[in-house]
Image (cartoon, grey):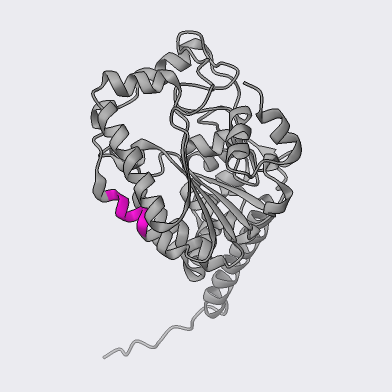
Amino acid sequence: MRIALPTARPAHAGGFAPAFIGTVALFVAVLAIVTVWRDPYWIFRDNPPWTRNGAGASRLLDVEMRLVKPLQIARLKPETLLIGSSVVYRGFDPRDVAASAGRVYNAGFSSLMANELPTLAALAVDIGSVKRVVIELDYFMFTALPPPPAIKSQLAKASGRIEAAVATILNPEAPNHLIGGQLKRTEPGLWHGDGYKATPDFDAELTRLVTREQKIAAMVYRPGDLAHLDRALDLLRGRAVILVLSPMSGAQRELVRAGGRAEELATWQRDIAALAMRRGVRFHDLVSDHPFDDFDPERGSSPHWIDTMHFKPVLGRWVLSRIGLAGVDAGAAATSG
């Protein structure tokens, strides 16, 4: 009978696991350092190396702004927030706001809906620096228009933001982002570190496309969504709040009328006005109360409008002047028209 004796283990076998773990840890550490330095999500630094003069083009900021912007807000700790849809991030340059407003951040989000307002209000409260909030409202926010994925409520808490920031470092796509993958553009324009996007003029082909894609049939007014705004105002109690109904171009108002939504739009205007009065909040209805009807979708961008929905900063300066937040130079420029 033969007895099998245990074979000797190679001398290097016991050191494989520690070596492997050390290699992985080194890789993660290097990736973290390079990611923070390159900062493809623009959440760690004021001027990452892929930006120039405080601005840059980034696909990540276009498609992941609901992650990026809350993290930017928490890092920058602004005193004034400009909240709204893409109308806000294209139409309001924080540099046009009065210096007395302190640091200003443009918290405009593509297709922001009413149910996201409480999360942004909770974020403003959580970071502690925000003293003033301008909430620019668009009619579509309170309709049955199919919404995008909402801002994650966890981002209103410090723990959730830390977890999200770490996830950007450990993202499997991080290496691609670090070599420039984030620079593939989806929309024209340059983002600024304060949330504003400088947008070039659109040609007639693009403004016609934007006009045709307006989903007026889906914009059924839902009065119940006013509860989201009410909740946001509850959270912001003690801070200066200004509610603004966003200016609409004549072309957009005509689309609403032709689509059978004019009465619903008027009802929404009255409802927001009543809510503002009940809450004692400053309120400006600028839907049609403006002199800037120079836009024709058949001719491309106009002096005051990028397209059917979005106005330019020159009109934004006029809005800031109307609500008492324009800087001296901006206020002077805003009186034209």
Residue under the point 56% across and 76% down: 18
Residue at image coords 48%, 68%: 157
Q: What secondary structure prevails in the magenta region?
A: helix
Residue 259 drawn at (x, y percent): 26, 22
**How far across and down, in percent of the image, does residue 194 sit?**
64, 47
Nearer to the camera, 294 or 190: 294
Q: Is residue 88 visible?
A: yes
Residue 119's image quarter? Answer: bottom left
Magenta span of residues = 225-230
* Residue at position x 49%, y 11% in the image: 204
Q: Is residue 38 left or right of 311 when viewed as pictured? A: right
Report whether 331 appears left or right of 157: right
Give above or below for 128 relative to 149.
below
Q: Identify the image quadrant of the N terminus.
A: bottom left
In x, y percent, where is residue 62? 51, 38
Against 271, residue 206 (above or below) is: above
The reply to whether residue 50 is visible in this rendering is no
**Quadrant showing the C terminus:** top right
Asked whether residue 279 is drawn in magenta, I would say: no
Query: Against 309, is 238 above or below?
Result: below
Q: Determine whether, in the image, residue 256 is placed left or right of residue 287.
A: left
* Residue 331 location (% of width, % of height): 69, 35
Number of marks: 0
Instruction: Based on the picture, tell me whether residue 228 belongs to the magenta stretch.
Output: yes
Q: Residue furthest top?
A: 298
Q: Is residue 154 left or right of residue 144?
A: right
Residue at x 61% of width, y 49% of height: 105
Which quadrant of the figure has residue 4? bottom left
Location of residue 108 with respect to 203 vertically, above or below: below
212 and 274: which one is in front? 274
